Amino acid sequence: MSAVRLVRSGGLAAAPYAYASRVEADAELVFLAGACPLADDGSTVAVGDVAGQAQRCVETMLVALDAAGAALTDVASTRVLVASADRRDLVAAWDVVRAAFGDHGVPSTLIGVAALGYPDQLVEIEAVAAVRRG
C-alpha cells in the first residue's frame, strides 16, 4: 500500500487531479531530479514534439522511481515544465503525463517557461515520491 494519500475537496473546482496529498509518517521522501527527454546517448529525443518529449520524460521518471524503490503510485506531487507560452503545448504535455498516472491523480503544477537546459528540450517533469521505510 502506498504511503501517499490523495486529498480531494468538494469545496474546490472539479479537476482531474487531487489538490493535495498526504504522506504517511512511516515514509521516506524521494526527490527526483527533473526527468528530461534524453536518449541514452544524451541527445534530446522528439525534437519539436511536445507530446513525444513528455512521453520520454515519463519513461525517464519511471526508471528513476524504480531505482529509488518507488512507483508512480508513490508520487506525492509533480511539476511539469514546458518551454512554451502556447497553452496547446502545455496541454499536449499534460495529457501525456495525466495518462501515465491514470487513477493516481497526483497534485501537479503545469508551468510554461522560457527555456529548459538541454538543446531542443521542450519538457521536463519534477516529482516527489514517498516510500515506506523498509
Image (cartoon, grey):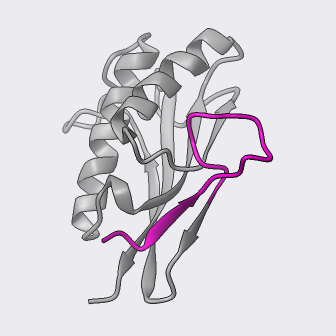
Image x and y of residue 35, in percent: 41, 45
Task: Determine the residue positioned at 47% across, 33% down.
Answer: 118
Q: What residue occupies the far left of the structure in this picture? A: 40
**Residue at 63% across / 28% down in the picture?**
115
Judge from the rendering whether residue 11 lies leftward or rightward of residue 126; answer left or right.
right
Snapshot quadrant of residue 51: top left
Quadrant holding the N terminus: bottom left
x 24%, y 52%: residue = 63
Q: Which residues are magenta?
A: 1-20
User: Which image quarter holds the C terminus?
Assistant: bottom left
Residue at the (37%, 38%) spot, across then down? 102
The quadrant in which residue 79 appears is top right
Image quarter of residue 56: top left
| Above or below for 47 versus 97 | above
Q: Is residue 84 left or right of residue 40?
A: right
Residue 124 percent location from the top left of the image: 49, 37
Q: Is residue 124 above or below residue 77?
A: above
Residue 121 visible in image: yes
Report the predominant secondary structure element of the magenta stretch. loop
Residue 122, visible in the rendered structure: no
52 magenta-colored: no
| Residue 10 falls within the magenta-colored stretch | yes
Question: Percent x, y for residue 97?
Answer: 43, 33
